[in-house]
């Protein structure tokens, strides 16, 4: 079943991602949501298109989407959608945005797709089936020491807003390099061996559902601040199994 769902999710993510390109670097209307995060016509149209494709293939499955909420909540299989993750990048013409599809079976993440259509990069994974970048196997880096690691975040100010300035400072000082190649693309960078650590202080389920399968199947770990490998904590970081004990120790020191 996972192999079939992985193939279907890959095809549907491509359909949705390709649609976003019709608006990318164009003058699109930007609307502020209740939390002041931007949403565009492209977000809404893309999610509607993805939902249509899922219903056509799997009408009995459930759907959880950022823009249009939940359907068929009683289903054991739930598709979790973020049509444009990194909307701020998208509306500024920066190609580091992604289309995300995660699939939960009995509330456990089993399939993940991270698709960066403007870069033509698609990372796909199904639990037990490995992770690929554009069809070829991908793996996390084998960096052994945190002092040699590249550390990614989405927005530095988010640490201040969530009261985690000291955590950010320690991670920044103990790693070799830090950059803001963030949102889901940052986690994809870890899964494909181009960075060593990515942390998001705030994640919704539609942000996180695709990340865990991709990172885990690439040989890494997606964890919350307490070392739990879950998508339900509202935050999360991706790293390698080698660096995980070092990173976990830092998070534990700053977690109440």
Image (tube, grey):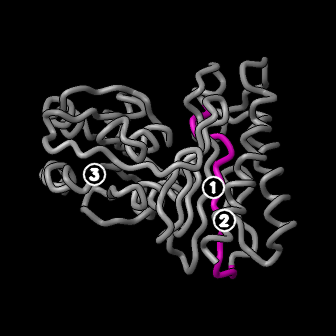
Q: CA distance from mark 1 to mark 2?
A: 7 Å
Give the labeled residue for mark 1. Answer: 101
Could you tell which of marks 1 and 2 lies nearer the N-terminus?
2
Q: Residues within 10 Å of mark 3 (few under 14, many from 20)?
A: many
Give the image quarter of residue 7: bottom right
Helix, strand or loop at mark 3? strand
In the figure, 128 relative to 200: above or below? below
Relative to the observer, which residue lies in front, 254 or 92?
92
Query: Separation of disc 3 and disc 2 at Cα?
Result: 26 Å
Residue 92 numbered tag: none
Badge 1 element = strand
Q: Alpha-carbon distance for marks 1 and 3?
A: 22 Å
Give the residue at x 44% y 59%: 212
- Choose mark 1 or mark 3, whichever is in front: 3
**Which residue is label 3 attached to?**
240
- Mark 3 vs 2, N-terminal side: 2
- Whether the residues at callouts 1 and 2 have beta carbons within 8 Å, the answer is yes
Q: Position of residue 106 (x, y in %)?
A: 56, 80
Q: Is residue 102 left or right of residue 20?
A: left
Label 2 sits on a secondary structure element that is strand
Residues drawn in magenta = 74-87
């Amino acid at each position: 079943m996972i192999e079939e769902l992985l193939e279907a999710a890959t095809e549907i993510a491509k359909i949705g991602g390709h649609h976003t390109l019709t608006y990318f670097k164009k003058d699109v209307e930007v609307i502020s949501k209740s939390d002041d995060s931007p949403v565009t016509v492209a977000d809404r149209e893309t999610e509607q298109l993805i939902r249509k494709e899922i219903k056509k293939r799997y009408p009995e499955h459930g759907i959880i989407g950022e823009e249009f909420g939940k359907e068929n909540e009683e289903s054991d299989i739930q598709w979790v959608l973020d049509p444009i993750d990194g909307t701020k990048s998208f509306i500024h013409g920066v190609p580091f945005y992604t289309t995300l599809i995660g699939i939960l079976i009995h509330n456990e993440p089993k399939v993940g797709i991270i698709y960066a259509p403007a870069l033509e990069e698609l990372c796909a994974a199904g639990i037990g089936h490995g992770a690929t970048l554009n069809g070829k196997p991908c793996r996390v880096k084998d960096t052994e020491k945190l002092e040699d690691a590249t550390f990614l975040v989405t927005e530095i100010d988010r640490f201040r807003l969530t009261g985690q300035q000291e955590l950010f400072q320690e991670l920044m000082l103990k790693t070799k390099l830090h950059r803001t190649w963030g949102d889901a693309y940052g986690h994809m960078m870890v899964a494909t061996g181009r960075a060593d650590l990515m942390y998001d202080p705030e994640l919704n389920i539609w942000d996180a559902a695709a990340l865990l399968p991709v990172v885990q199947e690439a040989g890494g770990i997606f964890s919350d601040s307490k070392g739990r490998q879950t998508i339900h904590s509202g935050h999360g970081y991706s790293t390698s199994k080698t660096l995980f004990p070092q990173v976990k120790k830092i998070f534990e020191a700053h977690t109440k």
